[in-house]
Image (spheres, rainbow, N blue to C red):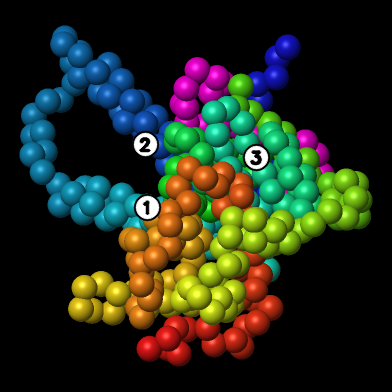
Amino acid sequence: MWDFPLFPDQASVNAPKLDALMLFELGVILFFTLMIALLILGFCVRFRRGNPVDRSHAPTHSKAMEVAWIVIPLLISVVMFAWATRLFFELYEPPSDAVQIDVVGKQWMWYLQHPQGRSETNELHVPLGRPMKLNMTSQDVLHSFYIPAFRIKQDVLPGTYTSLWFEPTKVGVYNLFCAEYCGTNHSVMIGKVHVMEPADYEHWLAEKGSGPSQAEEGERLFVQNHCAGCHRGSQIVHAPKLEGIYGKPVPIQNGDKVEFATADYLYIRDSILDPKKQVVAGYEPLMPSFKDQISEPDLLKIIEYIKSISNANANTNATPETAK
Ligand code: CUA
């Protein structure tokens, strides 16, 4: 039953880099801790009462020593800072070709959605050697997505999206934990990450038959929730077109001023759940709220759909300039 490795597998590109930094810091800490402890002990013994040692001319200060204890720790700290900062940017900047998987945490399970259409709970299948990006949100309380073997951990928050990325370097099965106390069954909010050979992964993706992709499923929801009625060139209701908006600045009416917001996941999500919050300049605040009507996984599918029509029609100019 002893399954408590002190040092988890190094199974991602970033794992050895993170371990190197941690070992360096641990080394610095051990060195100074031991040095100070041994000096204290040594002086205690040497200058104990009754020991006949020369106690005259005790130095009151030493310039060389003062310079040393300022300069040496400063240099070590600067090295740690530069090293860690560089690593931080690598850890938080996913490669542009990373494949995105949407993650929804809820009491007490993980829901994971692959772009090709397959979804899973508490299991994540990924191909070896391909960078993967996780786009995560929570349906209820704070959770935290943690894969020790990949050395990645990130809080998962309700009402917004956070992300993580990794590139697996070793085929195998690894632990997936929730690392934030999230209620009674927090301890069972665990799962497995399966790193597979790319060919096996393709097989796995196709196992459930060629169902709709995530974006296609999103389009179905888009129509089913009557979004299409207004947002697809309705003659009766005047609503912004959505082709090409993803990732672009959107003009927002704020009193007399027009401000710009970027149409990212959070913006689109807020526009669906709280449409009156940010009204696109030139439009009336007519859209009803879909709060509590669409689940988090379905919201993500709809956003993936809107994203897909932005990528497919990258040249479509859908800014509402024409509306004025
Ligand atoms: Cu979810 Cu702890």
Give the distance between the C-alpha atoms of the residues marked 1 and 2, in whole angstroms: 12 Å
Residue beneath the point at 43% across and 62% down: 287
Which numbered tag is attached to residue 76? 1
Magenta stretch encompasses residue 114:
no
Is 316 left or right of 170, judged from the image as shown?
left
Q: Position of residue 11 (x, y in %)?
A: 71, 45
Q: Is residue 178 magenta?
A: yes
Neighbour tally class for label 1: few under 14, some 14-19, many 20 plus, Cα within 10 Å: few
Q: Is residue 20 above or below residue 231?
A: above
Q: What amino acid does circle 3 point to?
A: Tyr
What segment carries the magenta color?
A: 168-187
Judging from the image, what secondary structure is the residue with disc 3 in? strand
Amino acid at pointer 1: Ile
Q: CA distance from mark 1 to mark 3?
A: 43 Å
Q: Do labels 3 and 2 touch, CB within 8 Å?
A: no
User: Which quadrant of the figure has residue 100?
Assistant: bottom right
Q: Is residue 139 left or right of residue 223?
A: left
Q: Name the residue type under label 2.
A: Phe
Sooner in the amino-acid sequence: mark 1 or mark 3? 1
Point out which mark residue 32 bears: 2
Q: In this rendering, is residue 100 above or below 42?
A: below
User: Along the polypeptide, which appears first: circle 3 or circle 2?
Assistant: 2
Does residue 89 appear to the left or right of 66 in the view shown? right
**Mark 2: C-beta under 8 Å from nearest atom of ligand 1:** no
Question: What number is the disc on residue 111?
Answer: 3
